[in-house]
Amino acid sequence: MSDDGLNLLQDLDYSVLQQCMHCGMCLPTCPTYDATLHERSSPRGRIAMMRAIADGELEASTTFAEEMYFCLGCLACQTACPAGVDYAALFENARAEVERQGLLDGAVRNFVRRWILGWLFAKQTRLRAVARLLRAFQRSGLQALARRSGLLRLLPFGLGKLEPLAPQISPRFTNQLYRRDLQQSNPPTPRYRVALLAGCVQDISFAEVNADTICVLQHNGCHVLLPEAQACCGSLHAHNGAVEQAQQQARLNIDAFDAENLAAIVVNAGGCGLHCKHYDRLLVDDPTYAERAAAWSAKVKDVHEWLADIGLRQPRAAMPAQQVAYHESCHLKHGQRVSAAPQEVLQAVPNLELVPLAEADWCCSSAGIYNITQPELSMQLLDRKMVHVCATGATAVATGNTGCAIQLQYGVRRAQAAVDVVHPVSLLAAAYRAENQGGTQCSTLA
């Protein structure tokens, strides 16, 4: 254990810890409490442990550390809390303290954190280089061969079990699609000047969703920029206790985007958007970046939120009838408090019927890398989600977050269901493109 004190919990604004009234309103909303019925696995139980550590009444231990990483971080408790407890701040500080003290240190874990968080996701060029290798593996037939042969079971540290969770790599990345098809489609007399955060996994595995987002923005009078120097937003780092790396990622993006001269910084992934809106809090003590971080956070908008703000243009195309269910991203609904806007986007698509989904805002259990660190409970929660998705009879389930999309895609394969996983803006983009008689480019109508 580190001997330099429990700074991250002791230095936290104590009033935040005191806000919890232990009323229990959070209990029915918490997936881990629902699964275990253990008080320590509830939001109020975790806050009680944090407060005891901050008061010096309890020593941070492996049990505390494991409990902090057993939490999904879905923030459903924040929506339910009548006292307005900022659980997100408590949760991230607690995990940062776990990492500062090295309570879960181990050779494999430290190696993964160093090379995945500290190296791979630190630079977009590195991530794209690795993605190109993975794309070649997937498209060459080697992936299918490895699966059939059983070779993946021989991988160390249980890595073979994680391979099915890996998303497909896009044929082209966002910057390539932007330069080839989308940059020239910016409206000649735009109403707004915005920039898109391409993301990290979103960029390499859901580049078509980024292209659809740009298309939709252009059809709604936005000149869209795609800053080339942008980086991973840092949410993966912040949610896993790597605060300094998260701060560095924030600085890279603040430098890459000219926030002052933008109407909005548009984000199409719920988890990334929530983290980006908190750059001001992340860099509050940075004398060089604090003011710029506040300006950045004020400009960040979820794509659905932005479309609702500026007034979404109704598509004029005749679209095939389709039934779509909507799964609410935890960080979009509970973190950003954006719930109605994505459904408004879906309802704007001609001939689309939005069918009710039971427990639509119950976590799908992707939760960053939860499906890797807590595979047993993650799969239980995913199976629960897929039962509800299949019960809708919908041909597609829409969601506004990258992690949710990857998890639901795996859930569809696991359940052998005939359901597509889509982003709401992709359905809207298809309707706009249909106005151009199916053109592949997102040319803006006069």
Image (tube, rainbow, N blue to C red):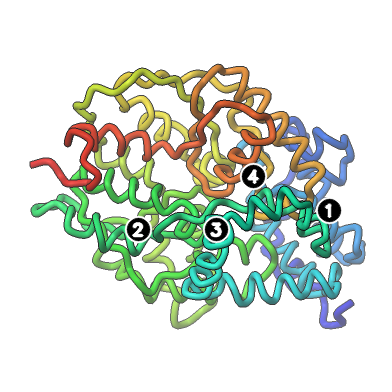
Choose mark 2 or mark 1, whichever is in front.
2
Reading the image, the residue beneath label 2 is: 196
Going from N to C along the chain, the mark reached first, 2 or 1, is 1
Question: Dot 4: within a 10 Å radius of its alpha carbon, few (fewer than 14), some, or many (20 or more) residues?
Answer: many
- The answer to which of 207 and 114 lies nearer the viewer is 207
- Rounded to the nearest angstrom, the CA distance separating label 2 from label 4 is 25 Å
**Quadrant in which residue 228 is drawn:** bottom left
Which secondary structure lies at badge 2? strand
Choose mark 4 or mark 3, whichever is in front.
3
- The answer to which of 167 and 302 lies nearer the viewer is 167
Reading the image, the residue beneath label 4 is: 75
In the image, residue 62 above or below residue 406:
below
Residue type at the position of mark 2 = Leu
Residue type at the position of mark 3 = Ser
- The answer to which of 217 and 242 lies nearer the viewer is 217
- Classify the position of the C terminus by image quarter: top left
Residue type at the position of mark 4 = Leu
The number of discs equals 4
Reading the image, the residue beneath label 1 is: 67
Expressed as whole percent of the image width and height from the top left, the position of residue 180 reads: 25, 60
In the image, residue 27 above or below residue 190:
above
Question: Dot 1: within a 10 Å radius of its alpha carbon, few (fewer than 14), some, or many (20 or more) residues?
Answer: some
Q: Which mark is residue 140?
A: 3
Residue type at the position of mark 1 = Glu
